[in-house]
Image (cartoon, rainbow, N blue to C red):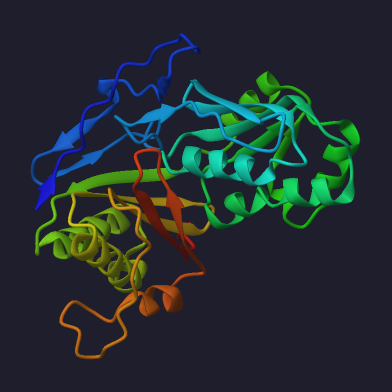
Amino acid sequence: MAQPSSGPGDFSPDLDQPHALIPASADHVRVSAFADHVRVPASAEHVRPGYPLASVELAAAEPPMRVRTHAFRQVVVLEYAGPLGSAIENLNNALELALAEGPRGVVCDLSAVYEGAEPDVVELLATAGRHVRDWPGIPVALAGSKRRVREVLRVHPIGGHLILMPTAPEAVSAVLDTPVPLVEWLRLAPHPTAPRAARNFVSRALLDWGMGTLIPSASLVVSELVTNSTIHAGSAVELSIAWHLDALRLTVRDCCPDLPRPRFSRFDQHGRGLSVVTGLSRAFGVLPTADHGKVIWAVLNAVRPG
């Protein structure tokens, strides 16, 4: 049973507020009664409407690493302050929370961070590039790091996926200059018909994008993701399908923090389990959300004709 996505919240420019919403004007959303899902035009379809991005202060070794989150033109900016070498894990956690909200992009501002160019610190910074590699369509930028750090990251096999800029404003501009992915959203109630509605939604989107040959594999993957969430989370789920640079990303968000559970029995009446997802996907994973839920995602190779 499909439900239209909730309307966007109001965006406050006051960066000291505990929450800052990604701006998404209601004029950007067109509701199709026939398809019973929300379609968003190219200017904003990458923005997931109606969910706040919470500013967080993450504990670390003394003195603590502080992280403040705000949004600028649909780009999430994470401002870090404190020692970087002892807080890489917290930096990554804040980045994952931001990515789970589906923004235009994420900028990690390290201007107030004090760190050296030690090989281990640079290597840990480079791991942020895996989110760009495995989570296509949402660019991630690092700003404010030392020049020699940027030079090392630029040639790193994983760090090379990052946008590297001296300042945060330059990083935001670079993110906004990247291609905008095709994205559509659907909200589903926890009902036995949810997997079928998800398959129909994905099939319509792929036909609209001229990629009908991907329907069998994408429908199977999304059916398994939605089935797993509706059975084990027992809450409404939010589904998205996105295409960007020969990659198709399928995401399912629910309100349960528990990791997805595999189903291996061939007699399982609900499907063949998450093993089929890993078999059909080039990448598969889970992101935590600020509301203590999760986003399960899978990426398929998808060359678009023409």
Q: Give the tally of numbered discs.
A: 0
Left or right: 97 as drawn, with respect to 218: right
Left or right: 258 as drawn, with respect to 169: left
Left or right: 121 as drawn, with respect to 281: right
Write the residue at 18% across / 77% down. Answer: 270
Name the one closer to the observer, 145 or 132: 145
| Residue extending furthest toward the front | 62
| Residue 86 in picture, x, y percent from top left | 74, 42
Image position of 133 with respect to 8: above or below: below
| Residue extending furthest toward the top | 14
| Residue 285 in picture, x, y percent from top left | 47, 61
Image position of 84 with respect to 2: above or below: above
Write the residue at 71% across / 32% down. Answer: 62
Write the residue at 25% across / 39% down. Answer: 39
Name the one closer to the observer, 290 or 185: 290
Image position of 253 with respect to 82: above or below: below
Left or right: 56 as drawn, with respect to 10: right
| Residue 104 in picture, x, y percent from top left | 49, 34
Q: Quadrant of residue 34?
A: top left
| Residue 188 in picture, x, y percent from top left | 17, 50
Write the residue at 9% across / 53% down. Answer: 1
Q: Quadrant of residue 147?
A: top right
